[in-house]
Amino acid sequence: MKFNYQARDKEGTVQSGTIEASSHETAVALLQKHGFYVTILKETAEIPFYAKRLKIFEGISLKDLVLFSRQLSIMFKSKVPLVESLIVLSEETKNPELKEKIIELSKEVEAGTSFSKALSRYPKTFSPFYISMIKSGEKAGSLSESLNYLSDHLEREYHLTARVKGAMLYPFLVFSIVLLVLGLMIFFVVPNLTQVLEGTNQPLPVVTKIVIEISAFLRNWLWLLILGIVVFISVGFRYYKSKHGKKFFNKIFLKIPLIGSFLKMLYISRFAENLSTLISGGLPIAEALNTVAEIIDNTCYKEAILKTRDEVRKGKSISSTLSSFPEIFPPVFTRMALVGEKTGTLDISLMNIVDFYKKEIERTIDNFLSILEPLMIIILGVIVAGVVLSVLTPLYKMITI
């Protein structure tokens, strides 16, 4: 429920705006918590369904977050007050969902709430990593540097994500074309040619019979096949979302040839970069490890990182603990981490690891695409040619007789 309110602050200044709460009493309590004396509080009228925004097409992307963080970093570095910076960014932001959040953030910060605490109220938008960096900057009085670290990190994350997504675009397009061509042949070409072939009363090759039977089955039972696929994917997705399912799939994915090695490089790079950024921002190592564990989306790495956090609190080094997980942290990683710990430059050593693995990721993607492009074309050609020949061969024989 949303409420329009008018209230006075401790200085007697009139404030007005909108607040979201579960009830009238909750809204009053929230405003009083921020030091407001409520004078008017009315529930907003329900917006007709046709006037509501279709939020399914909205959302805050990583690119939006990168631009927000970079612009906020520049403005804060230029000595523009935080509240004023947020107000300016809310006016310039084109994303309506992000605009709403920035406006709420500016109101909360202006009311006396710390920036990190205000961000923590939007966990779906601002990750624990993001909030930890801001909190560290607030404690150290170096919020500008923390925002700059965040901007650089998010930009690197965005470019890597965009590169991986771009690599998957070509196979998806080729696969879609294969399905489209096969669909046209099965539902339009094969049925018409089948009538001609059956009218000749001549024996058909085995391959031709198979194609005709598959075409007939798909035309009659495609809905059942699609339903079965949807049910299978839904059940698999629900199992994947469960604790045991996610752990099972995470282990399986890391053991798949080629895919497993690529995912390991991706997770190690993300772990090293996040940890380096947090350490550079001034967070204690144990706290930084705890934050990184929350944002690594793989249970195998999460368990290893949490184990490392516990051992670091006992006085052990990161490298010695990670070396007990050679299947997911290779020796080259632990040795470089050890060098960083000995020289007191762990953050720099971790970024060197990131640079190394990101080059390997780029090289892997390029090699994958160089092999996949001709392979997909060959597969497409073989499938289409096979279907065409299986149908046209009997026609050719009929004509030549």
Image: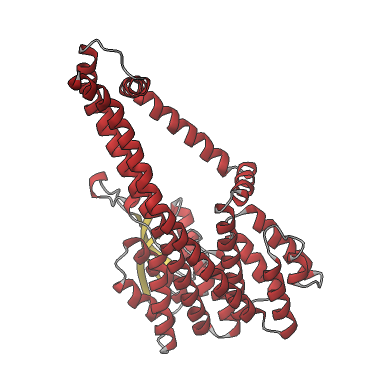
Q: How many marks?
A: 0
Name above or below for residue 304 compared with residue 117.
Answer: above
Residue at (34% x, 66% y) in the render? 99
Quadrant placement of the C terminus: top left
Nearest the camera: 272 or 336?
Answer: 336
- Residue 239, given in percent of the width and then of the height, sits at 57, 38
Residue at (47% x, 54% y) in the render? 25
- Residue 288, given in percent of the width and then of the height, sits at 65, 71
Residue at (29% x, 30% y) in the render? 389
Nearest the camera: 293 or 172?
Answer: 172
Locate residue 316 relative to residue 153 in the image: left or right. right
Residue at (38% x, 53% y) in the render? 373
Nearest the camera: 6 or 85?
Answer: 85
Residue 124 visible in the displayed image:
yes
- Residue 385, given in percent of the width and then of the height, sits at 30, 36
Residue lying at the far top in this picture: please name it. Answer: 201
Name above or below for residue 78 compared with residue 244.
Answer: below
Which image quadrant is residue 62 in?
bottom left
Locate residue 250 relative to residue 57 in the image: left or right. right
Residue lying at the far front in this picture: please name it. Answer: 401
Residue 1 visible in the displayed image:
no
Locate residue 275 relative to residue 202 in the image: left or right. right
